[in-house]
Image (spheres, grey):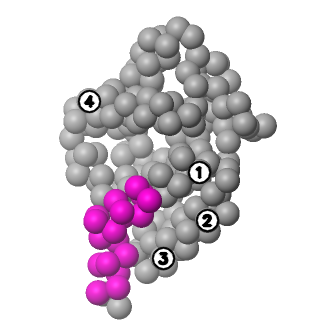
């Protein structure tokens, strides 16, 4: 059982699954949701059951990311033409997918708040820009303003995702 746990929670497997689902969700969006969503749910069930990952470690970062993206959409920083929701279902699934990487394959980033701040200011806006180039989203005008907002929002929010995904986060809240 320990060997299975090590495989399920391994950083390489987590990165492979994240990237495969990222491609399916960003390129396929709603047309591949019938494949990506069940795949993610199976993987997530394995992480929660076999891998000892706690629900809050995935749920809290996902809620924060979904809330931020919904707010950015509401304020016109993002536009999703094919969505009747604030953000499309595929992006909600993508946030849950990304939230599995925070306590697993990206956990080393959260150990240094300055690194998390810097990557939040660079890597996350870059990721949105890649999605924009692939047609998954359009940015509001002016384009540079949208990028600047992403830099500001994610430089502050990315370190918070690591904080709330810590395995003892909810226990620390109860102790205060």
Crowding at label 4, few (<14), some or many (≥20) Cα neighbours within 10 Å? some
Can you identify the residue that label 2 sits on?
35
Q: Is residue 128 visible?
A: no
Which quadrant is home to the N terminus?
A: bottom left
Q: Main secondary structure of the magenta part?
A: helix
Residue 92: image location, x then y, percent: 61, 47
Crowding at label 2, few (<14), some or many (≥20) Cα neighbours within 10 Å? some
Seen in the image, is 39 located left or right of residue 30?
left
Looking at the picture, tell me which residue is in the foreground, 173 or 2.
2
Crowding at label 3, few (<14), some or many (≥20) Cα neighbours within 10 Å? some
CA distance separating discs 2 and 4: 34 Å
Magenta residues span 3-20
Q: Is residue 121 visible?
A: yes
* Quadrant position of residue 167: bottom left
Q: Circle 4 sits in a helix, a strand or a loop, which is it?
A: helix
Can you identify the residue that label 3 sits on?
46
Image point (59%, 51%), residue name? 28
Seen in the image, is 167 located left or right of residue 49?
left
Residue 26: image location, x then y, percent: 53, 46
């Amino acid at each position: 059982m320990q060997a299975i746990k090590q495989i399920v929670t391994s950083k390489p497997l987590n990165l492979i699954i994240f990237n495969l689902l990222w491609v399916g969700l960003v390129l396929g969006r709603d047309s591949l949701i019938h494949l990506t969503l069940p795949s993610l749910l199976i993987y997530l069930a394995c992480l929660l059951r076999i891998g000892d990952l706690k629900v809050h470690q995935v749920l809290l970062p996902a809620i924060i990311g979904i809330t931020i993206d919904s707010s950015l959409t509401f304020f016109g920083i993002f536009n999703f033409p094919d969505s009747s929701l604030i953000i499309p279902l595929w992006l909600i699934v993508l946030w849950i997918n990304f939230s599995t990487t925070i306590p697993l394959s990206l956990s080393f980033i959260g150990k240094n708040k300055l690194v998390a701040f810097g990557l939040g200011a660079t890597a996350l806006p870059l990721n949105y820009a890649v999605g924009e180039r692939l047609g998954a989203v359009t940015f509001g005008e002016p384009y540079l303003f949208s990028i600047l907002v992403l830099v500001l929002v994610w430089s502050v929010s990315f370190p918070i995702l690591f904080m709330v995904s810590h395995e003892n986060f909810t226990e620390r809240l109860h102790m205060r």
